[in-house]
Image (cartoon, rainbow, N blue to C red):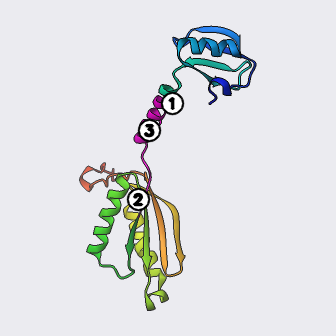
Amino acid sequence: MKVNREIRSPRVRVISESGEQIGVLALYEAIAKAEEAGLDLVEIVPTSNPPVCKIINYGKFRYDQTKREKESKKSQHQVKVKEIKLKPNIDDHDLQTKLRHARDFLAKGNKVKITCTFRGREMMHPEFGEQILRKMSEDLEDVATVEAPAKLFGRALTVVLAPGGKKKAAPVSPALKPAENHK
């Protein structure tokens, strides 16, 4: 944004500090009007012909602008990737605990990267890790979608889940199913 003598156009459309249009003036006249009011001439729309300039307090304008930018950043949610590490021979209870943590992360709007690491002879059977990752993905299907399918990188098998899955239909109990007609 150009201010006062940084403006290069010979003629500019001037808007007063109250917001009313003064008209198209020569640059030196517009700067004189701004100095007369004790304010700055700021180029607001440099692409128009002639450029639009406004008579305002530039310091206060910049302060308000940075304040608005900070406020808009504050309302944004940064999506983080949370990692959950597993082994191919994990116990059921431990797996349920990891699932609960993954659900919490997804509920907060974060992505979840599930990593199954193999040690030693566990590398001979990567299908065990694939089964665990598939089970976790299926269990989290109601709150997450698979963003990146399972891939083996060295000794680690990873899958990435993003929040926002399909809602599972509640299972219908046999008592609530409609009766079938028998002949």
Residue 107 in the image: x percent, y percent? 35, 52
Which residue corresponds to mark 2? 141
Q: Which residue is mark 3?
A: 70
Q: What type is the residue that disc 2 sits on?
A: Glu
Q: Is residue 31 above or below residue 76?
A: above
Looking at the image, which is closer to me, 28 or 48? 28
Please tell me which of labels 3 and 2 falls first in the chain: 3
**Mark 2 residue element:** loop
Where 73 falls versus 44 (above or below)? below
User: Dot 3: what SS?
Assistant: helix
Q: Position of residue 150 (x, y in %)?
A: 51, 70
Point out the stretch of residues depicted in magenta.
Answer: 62-82
Q: Nearer the viewer, mark 2 or mark 1?
A: 1
Badge 3 amino acid: Lys
What's the CA distance linking mark 1 and mark 3? Answer: 12 Å
Q: Determine which residue is flagged by label 1.
A: 62
Chief secondary structure of the magenta portion = helix
Question: What's the residue type where badge 1 is placed?
Answer: Arg
Q: Is residue 168 left or right of residue 23?
A: left
Q: Secondary structure at mark 1?
A: helix
Q: Residue at x 46, y 76 (%)?
A: 130
What residue appears at the point 48 percent right and 87 percent down from the top-left corner?
123
